[in-house]
Amino acid sequence: MSSTKTLPPVGAPSVGVQPRSRRIKRRGLGRRDTLVGFLFLAPLFIGLLVFRFYGFGYNVWLSFQKAGAFGPPTFNGLQNYQDLFSDSQFGVALVNTFKFCILAVPAVVIVSLLCATLMQRRFRGETAFRAIVFLPAVCLPTAIIFAFGWLFQTQYGLINAAIKGLGGSPVSWLGSSTGVAVIVTVAVVYLSFSVPTIILYAGMQDIPTEVYEASTLDGAGPVRRFFSITVPLLGPSLFFVILTTTIGVLKLFDVVYLLLPPEQSTSVNFGMTVLYYYYQLAFLGVGQRGYAAAISLVLFVLILVVSLVMFRLQRRFVHYGEDG
């Protein structure tokens, strides 16, 4: 018995094929959604173009100009960059910047690591301790910096009052390079340790408890577990904390600007950073905007080089699990 095959009516669309009008309508809806998406992203792109890319390009162009406070800039080639090698004040700012990095970055990492370790434990008052740890992240940095300035004030500061109470003589913290380094380092550490503590605490939460249990059965004590298990497995988090803290200290400005009075040139020289020196040249009426732009680009290259070196080193010292 032969089977008969029913054919679809003439003009009817075949199964699985959408009508042409529906395809055109869906294509039009897709284009409209794409246009709406670009319209929502347009303010972000415009902001990046105006305030980032244009500003950076203008700064590069300005670094090859001799630009004063008044009048149009004039092209002077590489003269601004050549002047950097003979500028003793820039050398002082560069040395101070690296000095603050050497002092503040390890201190921030150590304090953050200790606070994150304490947050792992259960004890009375742990809620208050966590609030104290996170307090610098929610307070105004300007208020914190002024508070440290009052603490280390020579005549009426609480630190010198405590030293007098113990029978010592008051210390002129702003009158020596060591005193300025102590004040700036303490202020930077207090301002910077809250967020790294949260990052390291989150990294500790991801370490499997089975690893600690196995090491305990093998006879490892708390100190051995911390240095042999916690620190190595926190490698990615520690690398992120060290990198971001280093970049932040290389761009240090607000602490020095608010702590050191401009009328005391000696104190300012003790705490002069590259970014603060750029601010002095570009905005305090000195009229060397082109030279200041060259300094800012040198700082940009310095941060880029330091970041690339750290990314190169992390391949050897940082392990990202089995896939790292």
Image (cartoon, rainbow, N blue to C red):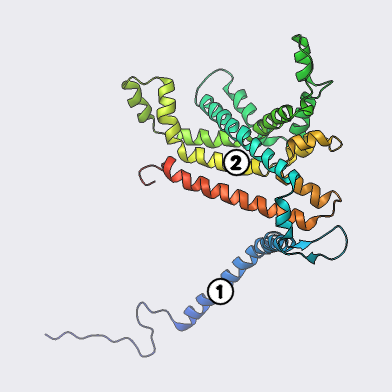
Q: Is residue 144 above or below residue 34?
A: above
The image quarter in which residue 80 lies = bottom right
Q: Name the residue at 63% across, 63% down.
A: 41
Q: Amino acid at mark 1?
A: Arg
Q: Which residue in the structure is indicated by mark 2? A: 246
Asked if residue 173 lies left or right of residue 41, the reply is right
Asked if residue 247 lies left or right of residue 267, the reply is left
Q: Are marks 1 and 2 in contact (CB under 8 Å)?
A: no
Q: CA distance from mark 1 to mark 2?
A: 45 Å
Query: Disc count in the image?
Result: 2
Badge 2 local density, few (<14 within 10 Å), some, or many (20+)?
many
> Looking at the image, is mark 1 or mark 2 nearer the viewer?
2
Q: Which residue in the structure is indicated by mark 1? A: 31
Residue 22 is situated, as x and y percent measured from the top left of the image, at 48, 79
Q: Name the residue at 38% across, 27% down.
A: 212
Q: Is residue 30 above or below residue 254?
A: below
| Residue nearer the viewer, 30 or 307 | 307
Residue 193 visible in image: no
Q: Residue furthest left?
A: 1
Q: Name the residue at 41% across, 25% down.
A: 225
Q: Amino acid at mark 2?
A: Thr
Q: Residue furthest top?
A: 167
Residue 12 is situated, as x and y percent measured from the top left of the image, at 38, 86
